[in-house]
Image (tube, helix red, strand yellow):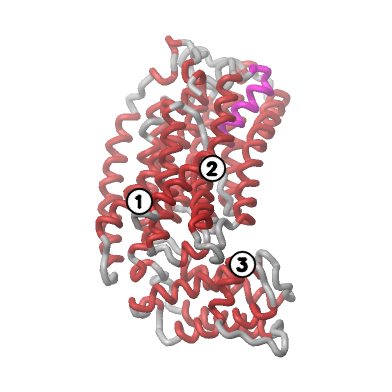
């Protein structure tokens, strides 16, 4: 895989864009330093405040786990975000330092303003029993195995300058943990393993997104050539002269958009992992969302009553159930549904809501009950997925609406991200963007095509990447910034007749192909090893 790194750059050394420092860039570093100090102060204060309700805190383990999780986002920053700045640097639209700092800042904003949908979509890949027992030895081994595996592969591909996908890496690690969990389960023990339906949906989005990047970027460049007949836009930049103002503005805007979308999409993966860590190590403080609005429990109880009424319509006469919770857990693990499951879910929802209704707010729930209530509510949410997403229990429209409304209320109680977690991930991702970016930038800017990246090629690739990643974030789907943008650059090279450096393309494809199996294998081995420790 090393020949892509050793190939001769196609950019004139006298006008190399990475050797053109900006006097403006130096002012942004101290500014971000102030943001970093302020952000860390806020994170420390908010974390201490949240932990004040915890009965006990394993400080050393919590600190190590958070450090590794934020380390993953830091590596993600300098590994993936370099793709966003390559086009503006190599088209001379912005000096390198300024482009990287700007990208880091908008990654920061993207994380802060993200919804959280992608975070919990990724976590849905994990075996349900590991999430319900995240504070156990198996849960801790899961978190450490998938984080360390993802960091190992990301660092390896970064060292070789290969734009591989952090999304692929993390998903492969999660699958590896799920397979190892099945492998270690005693014979005859039911285990849900990997949620292959969710994995296939995520895998499809990751597979299709680079094809979209390649095809749409190529088409957009060809359309630009027809509509904008400016020969200079499709030729190598002359010296250090920036492009025309309108194309330069477009390139800077799209670089900003890609950086923001990357933060919004990729940053959520770290948020979800940190929430797993917090729930596992300090469940009394983070297992339930203790800060919903004052009317939340009243709305929750009403939604619970509505869904109990709706489920009653589908309970068959003569059906009995001995242990409602066990029956629901079995249905979730096996992704199956029968007549007993309907009655069991109705009774389980009633029992859970009856327990919660004893308290005026979630904040008033005694710490001794938080873990159990959270697991019950989470399990109910996973069972509801079998109805409103998997359609295993056909329901009429109004009844299905009741299920969806209650599912939303359940998710509000268990799937939440405190603001300080977003700030911590934003700082790690933003800071990572400003460190170690050069290796990947050189590969994208110089070693994909045989000729220098033109203004039109850079704009086409960035526009397609920004729109694709933004749409995926809106739909709650994780996509790879690396795949979308680097394949977009390749698409423009092909459309422009520039030719591709097949040694680089081959190595990139090899890295993409190997990422899933390699990360699965590393996580599998790490999980098995860590189960001997925890």
User: Distance between the Cα atoms at labels 3 and 2?
Assistant: 24 Å
How crowded is the residue under tag 1: few (<14 C-alpha within 10 Å), some, or many (20+)?
Answer: many
Identify the residue at image location x=52%, y=55%. 183
Q: Position of residue 408 (x, y in %)?
A: 56, 70
| SS class, disc 3 | helix
Q: Is residue 340 above or below residue 210?
A: below
Q: Which residue is farthest front?
A: 187
Mark found first going from the N terminus, 3 or 1: 3
Q: Quarter of the image holding residue 45?
A: bottom left
Reading the image, the residue beneath label 3 is: 385
User: Distance between the Cα atoms at labels 3 and 1?
Assistant: 31 Å
Identify the residue at image location x=47%, y=77%. 296
Asked if residue 58 lies left or right of residue 223, the reply is left
| SS class, disc 2 | helix
Identify the residue at image location x=44%, y=13%. 15
Asked if residue 240 lies left or right of residue 221, the reply is left
User: Distance between the Cα atoms at labels 1 and 2?
Assistant: 23 Å
Mark found first going from the N terminus, 1 or 2: 2
Q: Quarter of the image holding residue 294?
A: bottom left
Is residue 260 at all visible to an observer of this figure? no
Identify the residue at image location x=53%, y=45%. 172
Reading the image, the residue beneath label 1 is: 424
| SS class, disc 1 | helix
Q: Position of residue 108 (x, y in %)?
A: 41, 45
The magenta segment is: 484-499
Mark found first going from the N terminus, 3 or 2: 2
Q: Quarter of the image holding residue 454?
A: top right
Q: Nearer the viewer, mark 3 or mark 1?
A: 3
Is residue 10 at all visible to an observer of this figure? yes
| Residue nearest the viewer, comparing 92 with 437 | 437
| Residue nearest the viewer, comparing 403 with 100 | 403
Reading the image, the residue beneath label 2 is: 168
């Amino acid at each position: 895989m090393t020949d892509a790194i050793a190939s001769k750059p196609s950019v004139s050394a006298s006008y190399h864009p990475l050797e053109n420092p900006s006097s403006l860039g130096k002012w942004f570093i101290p500014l971000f330093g102030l943001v970093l100090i302020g952000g860390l102060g806020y994170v420390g204060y908010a974390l201490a405040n949240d932990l004040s309700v915890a009965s006990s805190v394993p400080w050393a383990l919590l600190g190590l786990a958070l450090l590794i999780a934020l380390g993953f986002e830091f590596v993600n920053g300098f590994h993936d975000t370099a793709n966003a700045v390559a086009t503006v640097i190599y088209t001379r639209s912005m000096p390198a330092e300024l482009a990287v700092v700007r990208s880091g800042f908008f990654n920061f904003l993207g994380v802060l303003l993200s919804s959280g949908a992608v975070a919990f979509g990724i976590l849905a890949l994990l075996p349900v029993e590991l999430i319900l027992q995240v504070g156990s030895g198996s849960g801790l081994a899961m978190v450490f195995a998938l984080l360390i595996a993802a960091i190992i592969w990301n660092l390896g591909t970064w060292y070789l300058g290969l734009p591989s996908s952090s999304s692929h890496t993390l998903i492969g690690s999660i699958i590896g943990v799920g397979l190892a969990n099945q492998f270690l389960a005693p014979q005859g023990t039911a285990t849900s393993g990997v949620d292959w339906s969710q994995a296939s949906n995520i895998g499809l989005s990751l597979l299709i997104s680079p094809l979209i990047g390649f095809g749409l970027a190529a088409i957009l460049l060809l359309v630009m050539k027809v509509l904008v007949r400016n020969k200079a836009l499709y030729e190598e930049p002359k010296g250090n002269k920036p492009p025309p103002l309108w194309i330069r503005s477009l390139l800077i805007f799209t670089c900003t958009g890609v950086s923001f979308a990357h933060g919004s999409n990729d940053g959520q993966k770290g948020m979800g992992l940190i929430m797993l860590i917090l729930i596992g190590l300090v469940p009394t403080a983070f297992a339930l969302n203790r800060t919903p609005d004052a009317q939340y429990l009243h709305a929750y109880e009403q939604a619970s009553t509505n869904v109990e009424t709706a489920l009653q319509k589908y309970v068959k006469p003569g059906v009995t159930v001995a242990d409602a919770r066990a029956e629901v857990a079995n249905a979730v693990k096996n992704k199956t549904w029968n007549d007993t499951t309907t009655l069991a879910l109705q009774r389980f929802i009633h029992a859970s809501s009856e327990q919660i209704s004893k308290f005026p707010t979630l904040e008033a729930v005694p710490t001794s009950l938080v873990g159990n209530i959270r697991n019950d509510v989470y399990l109910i949410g996973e069972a509801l997925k079998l109805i409103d997403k998997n359609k295993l229990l056909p329901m009429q429209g109004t009844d299905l609406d009741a299920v969806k409304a209650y599912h939303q209320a359940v998710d509000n109680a268990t799937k939440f991200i405190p603001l300080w977690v977003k700030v911590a991930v934003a700082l790690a991702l933003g800071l990572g963007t400003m460190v170690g970016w050069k290796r990947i930038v050189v590969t994208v800017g110089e070693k994909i095509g045989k000729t220098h990246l033109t203004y039109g090629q850079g704009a086409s690739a960035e526009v397609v990447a920004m729109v694709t990643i933004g749409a995926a974030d809106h739909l709650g789907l994780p996509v790879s910034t690396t795949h979308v943008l680097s394949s977009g650059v390749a698409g423009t090279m092909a459309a422009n007749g520039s030719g591709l450096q097949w040694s680089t393309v081959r190595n990139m494809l090899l890295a993409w192909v190997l990422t899933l199996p390699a990360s699965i294998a590393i996580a599998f081995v790490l999980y098995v090893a860590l189960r001997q420790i925890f």
